[in-house]
Image (cartoon, grey):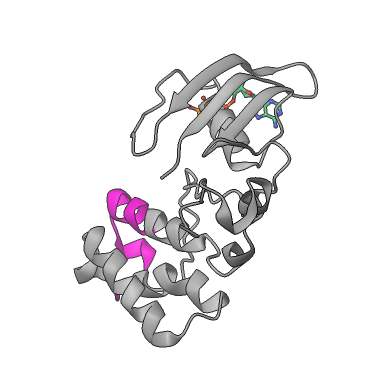
Amino acid sequence: MAKVELSGLSKVFPGGTIGLDDVDLTVNDGEFIVLVGPSGCGKSTLLRIVAGLEEPTKGTVAIAGVTVNDLAPQLRDIAMVFQNYALYPHMTVEENLGFSLRVQHHPKTDAAREVNEAAHVLALEPLLERKPKALSGGQRQRVAMGRADRDVDRTRHTRCRSHRRTGGQGSKVLCRVCS
Ligand SMILES: Nc1ncnc2c1ncn2[C@@H]1O[C@H](COP(=O)(O)OP(=O)(O)OP(=O)(O)O)[C@@H](O)[C@H]1O
């Protein structure tokens, strides 16, 4: 986990809809927070900006002390679970959890071990052979969380741009993957 700091964050969409208006928020390393508010108040917009899927009109996003406004989403070491969970319906829980590891060409034994660890932590062990349609909403959400965490490309982070920005290998600020 890393500290996330949002400063003066605003988003005005084309057409003039205000998505966010001057938001300041600090989430400390290891802190768990919940954004609560009425439909349309800007929760998804805020998360999309942190993940890099939306550009703020004003303000800055810093992760682990590094301003990431100009950093592409895949270089931010952020995982996001979407409201529809984005699971592959034709794959089992096990295949969904391991999909990104296969795409990243992780050795099979390492991938299997990581999938088993994730299944244990998320209490999905008895459900590994099931497909998403045979899961409850909460179970689907846990699979989506497990998959999102594996979506972070660990191979990419051997050349982590955050590191280069903060002084290369001697940097004190390391992302979760590289540290
Ligand atoms: N791409 C877009 N173009 C124009 N307006 C948008 C766009 N995306 C979101 N908005 C508007 O920005 C505001 C904030 O939307 P956002 O999706 O962040 O709300 P939310 O708090 O996540 O809502 P919900 O709880 O219903 O999911 C809303 O008024 C929404 O209509």
Q: Which of these two is toward me, 126 or 66? A: 66
> Which residue occupies the foreground of this view, 41 or 90?
41
In the rendered view of the protein, which quadrant contains the C terminus? bottom left
Q: Quadrant of residue 153?
A: bottom right
Q: Position of residue 147 (x, y in %)?
A: 43, 61
The tally of labels here is: 0
| 115 drawn magenta | no
Q: Main secondary structure of the magenta part?
A: helix
Establish if 33 lies above or below 106.
Answer: above
In this rendering, position of residue 159 left or right of residue 38 = right
Which residue is painted at 40% across and 78% down in the image?
111
Residue situated in front as seen by the camera: 70 or 119: 70
- Please name whichever residue, 135 or 53, is drawn nearer the observer in this view of the structure: 53
Image position, residue 3 (x, y; %): 46, 35
Which residue sits furthest bottom?
Answer: 108
User: Farthest residue toward the front?
Assistant: 170
The residue range painted magenta reads 128-143
User: Where's residue 74, x and y in %?
Assistant: 63, 54
The residue lying at 39 percent from left, 22 percent from top is: 36
Q: As drawn, is 54 to the left or to the right of 104?
A: right
Picture layout, residue 31 above or below residue 138: above
- For image coordinates 64% across by 49% down, the residue present is 167
Horizontal arrangement in the rendering, residue 174 relative to residue 112 (left or right) = right
Q: Outermost residue, right direction? A: 15
Residue 10: quadrant of the picture = top right
